[in-house]
Amino acid sequence: MAVSISVVLLLLIMAVVFLRNGALKISHALVCALLGFYLAGSSMAPTIHDGLTATADIVSALQP
């Protein structure tokens, strides 16, 4: 749960930065948000979640 909240916050921060720089328009941000909601409700959601969880586990296991 904490990883998904972190990813959502990261994506939100990136979207705000892109909006402020003019690289992302409001319509593009809405399309991206709708895509995310549709992906979350699709049959691919468990696969995406497992992939993100595995990636987070690998990154957290790295030693600097």
Image (cartoon, rainbow, N blue to C red):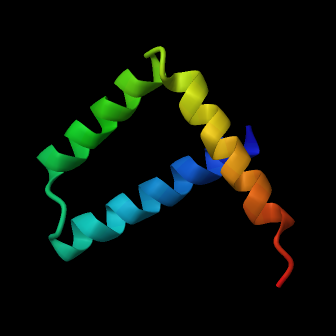
> The C terminus lies in which quarter of the figure?
bottom right
Residue 8 left/right relative to 28: right
Task: Return the residue found at the far bottom.
Answer: 64
Q: Tell me what residue is drawn at x 63 percent, y 53 percent.
A: 6
The vertical placement of 2 against 35, above or below, is below
Along the viewing direction, whichever of 3 and 46 lies nearer the viewer: 46
Q: Tell me what residue is drawn at x 60 percent, y 23 percent.
A: 46
Q: How many marks?
A: 0
Q: Kindly indicate the quadrant of the structure image that contains residue 60.
A: bottom right
Q: Tell me what residue is drawn at x 32 percent, y 38 percent.
A: 33
Residue 63 left/right relative to 35: right
The vertical placement of 43 against 44, above or below, is above
Q: Tell me what residue is drawn at x 14 percent, y 56 percent.
A: 25
> The N terminus lies in which quarter of the figure?
top right
Residue 8 on image: x %, y %:
53, 47
Residue 22 on image: x %, y %:
15, 71
Along the viewing direction, whichever of 16 and 31 lies nearer the viewer: 31
The vertical placement of 52 against 25, above or below, is above
Residue 5 on image: x %, y %:
63, 45
